[in-house]
Image (cartoon, grey):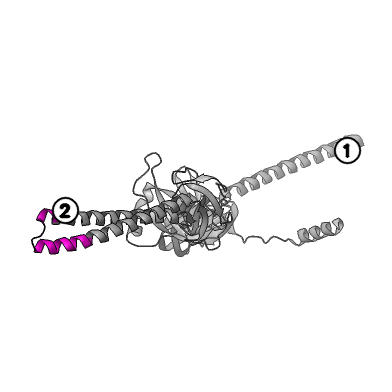
Amino acid sequence: MNLKKALIAAGVVVALAAAGYAGFRGWQSARMSKMSMMPRTVAVQVAQAVRQDVPTIVTALGTVTANQTADVISQVQGHLTNLYFKEGDFVKKGALLAKVDTRGYEANLQQYQGTLAEAQAQLANAKSVLERYERLYRQDSISKQDLEAQRAAVKQYEGSVRSARGQIANASVSVGYGRITAPISGYIGIRQRDLGNLVGPSDSTPIAVITQTTPIAVEFSIPQGNLSEVVGPVRSGQKLQVDVFDQSGLGLLARGTVSAVGNTIDQATGTVKVKSLFDNRDSKLFPNQFVNVKLVTGTLKNAVVVPTSAIQTSQNGLYVFTVGDDQVAHKAAVKIGPATEDGKTAILEGVAEGARVVTAGADSTSDGSKVTVVEPKAVDTSAVEKKSKGVGRGRR
C-alpha cells in the first residue's frame, strides 16, 4: 500500500516538473521572439560636415629636366692641351674650361697680318700716283684712260686691304676659340675627352656637359580633359602652383609654378605636356629624377567637406550615413568633389553643413538603424613602452 502511494507521488512530481519545463521553454521562446523584433542598436563614430576652401588638384608623374643643357665642344680643330675644371663643380658662364692647340691658326694670323701690310703699302702708293695723274690730267698731260686705270688700281688695293683685314679677323676668332669657356652657368659633368685628344667642331662626343639646375624644370603630362583649367589661366598670365613630391608621394621636394603648356595633344595618350620651373636653391631636384606632381588648378570656395572615411560605395553610387537627433542612421546619396590634404572630401550634393556623418561602423549600419554615438578610444601605450624599456635593459 505504501509502495503504491510512493509511485503515485513520484508520478505527480514528474508531471509537475515536465509542465514547468514546458512553460519555461514557452516563455523563453516568446522572449527571444520579442527581442528579435526589437530594433538593433549599432555603435558608430561620427564627424560633422563643415565648410572650408578646397583646392582642385591634378596629379601626374613628372620628370626633372635641366632648364638648360650645354655641350662643351671646341669650335676649332686641335689637340686638347689644358683642362681647368673639376668634374662635378659649379662653373659660371664665361669661366675658362679648357685650351686647344692653336699654333696653326696663330701662324695664319701672322701671314694675314703680313698680307695686310703689303696691301696697305700698295694702296698708299696707288693713291699717291692717282694724285699725280689727276694734276697731269688737268694740265692735259695724260689721257683720261690712264687716269681711270689708276683709279681702278686704287680700288683694287682697297679691296685687298679689306680682304686681308677679314682674314685677320677670322684667324683671330679661331685663335680665340682655342680658349674654351662655359656657355652657361651650371654644374659640369664627368669629363669625356682627355688631354692630347684631337677635338673639333664636328665631334659627336663633347669634352663635358653643363646642366643648369637653378632654376630647374619638371615636365609632366595632364589629361586633355583638364586642358581648359590650365591653358586659359597660364596664357592670361596667372601663376598656377605646382607641388613636387618624392616617389613615395609624401615628402614635399619643391613648390613652383607652371611656365609653359604644350601646343599639341598626344594622340596616343590623350595628354598634353606641361613644364614648370623651380628655384631649386637646396638642390633637392636632380635632372632625370622621377617625381609625383600636384598641379593646383583652382580653389572650391566654402565647400562642404566630410572625412573621406565617411564615403561608402554601392552599386547605385556613393553615399554616406547621416545621424539625426533621433539617433537613427539615414542613407544619403552624395556627389563628391576634390579631396583635401587633411583626409577630407568635398561634397557637392547630398550633405548639408553641420550634418553628422558616420565615419566608423558604417559596415554594420543600414538605412533606419538605431545607432549609439561613441568616441574613439585612446590607445594606452604605457604597457608597450614599459615592455620596450625592459627589453632594452635585458639587451644591455
Q: Quadrant of the C terminus?
A: bottom right
Secondary-structure class at tag 2? helix
In percent of width and height, residue 97 lies at 52, 56
The disc, 2 or 1, on the residue closer to the chain's N-terminal end is 1
Q: Nearer the viewer, residue 85 or 294?
A: 85
At a point 46% along the width and 65% down the height, the residue shown is: 52
- The x and y percentages for residue 72 are 48, 51
Instruction: Say which residue appears at 41% left-offset and 41% top-offset.
Output: 269
Asked if residue 58 can be seen in this view, the reply is no
Residue annotated with mark 1:
6
Residue 310 at x, y percent in the picture: 52, 54
Q: What residue range appears in magenta?
A: 127-146
Residue at label 2? 149
Asked if one can make out residue 256 in the rendered structure from this viewpoint, the answer is yes
- As drawn, the residue found furthest toward the right would be 2
> Is 144 one of the magenta-colored residues?
yes
- 2 shown above or below 64: above
Q: Quadrant of residue 113?
A: bottom left
- For mark 1, give the secondary structure: helix
Q: Amino acid at mark 2?
A: Ala
Rendered view: 8 above or below 368: above
Q: Main secondary structure of the magenta part?
A: helix
Q: Tell me the kind of residue under disc 1.
A: Ala
Number of marks present in the image shown: 2
Q: Residues within 10 Å of mark 1 (few under 14, many from 20)?
A: few
Kindly indicate the quadrant of the structure image that contains residue 134.
bottom left
Give left or right: position of 245 versus 114. Answer: right
Q: Quadrant of the N terminus?
A: top right
